[in-house]
Image: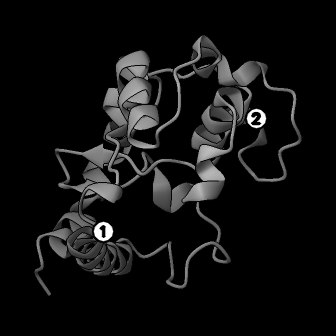
Amino acid sequence: MTYVSELDCSSTAAFIAANGWTRRNQELGGDLAAGLPYRVTRSTLAVDAYDLFDLGQYYRSYEELMSHWKILLESRLITVRYEELVSDPERVLRLLLESLSLQWDSACLSHEQNVGRVDTLSLYQVRQPLNTDSTERWRHYEQHLEPLRQALAGKD
């Protein structure tokens, strides 16, 4: 992780924002972005992201893989809850930077002011301040999420 510690704080904040943290959704019991099946392109995942059951199974595999890495890496694997990041960014970012042995810089709270090049589909999102706008967006689709709930619960 040496390359991460060489980044300045504004670059680190931009990296954090640009790389799309997974979002812990307590109601569904998984780290799924609000409306994920509707925003992910087929080229992004190796599964059919338009089938909620398949997406849930894929996510369970991801959880198993992350459990493996958590055992191997212990405290070096950092999990950030999206809702905590957007509701209390300074506290979460301070903890994250501390774990990376980076000094705090208030520029971390204004990553959207970084004028660096962004070559991802999240170009617009990276340029926005952290906000809580999407934390409950999944509720718009709640009535359609039963296959996802089934898969996340391990029901076949």
State how far apart marks 2 and 1 are (Cα): 33 Å
Residue drawn at (69%, 27%) of the image: 10
Please state which amino acid type lies under the numbered disc 2: Tyr
Whether residue 113 appears in this view of the structure is yes
Residue drawn at (54%, 84%) of the image: 46
The residue under label 2 is 124
Quadrant of residue 84 within the rendered picture: top left
**Residue pushed farthest top?**
106
| Residue count near mark 1 (Cα–Cα under 10 Å), binned few <14, some 14–19, many ≥20 | few
Closer to us: 138 or 71: 71
Q: Tell how many labels.
A: 2
The residue under label 1 is 73
Quadrant of residue 122 within the rendered picture: top right
**Dot 2: element:** helix
Residue 38 drawn at (x, y percent): 54, 57
Please state which amino acid type lies under the numbered disc 1: Leu
Q: Please tell me whether residue 45 is drawn above or below residue 123 in the rendered image.
A: below
Q: Evaluate if marks 2 and 1 touch, with contact meaning CB atoms under 8 Å apart.
A: no
Quadrant of residue 16 within the rendered picture: top right
Q: Please tell me whether residue 90 is drawn above or below residue 146 in the rendered image.
A: above
Closer to us: 13 or 147: 13
Whether residue 136 appears in this view of the structure is no
Residue 87 drawn at (x, y percent): 36, 19
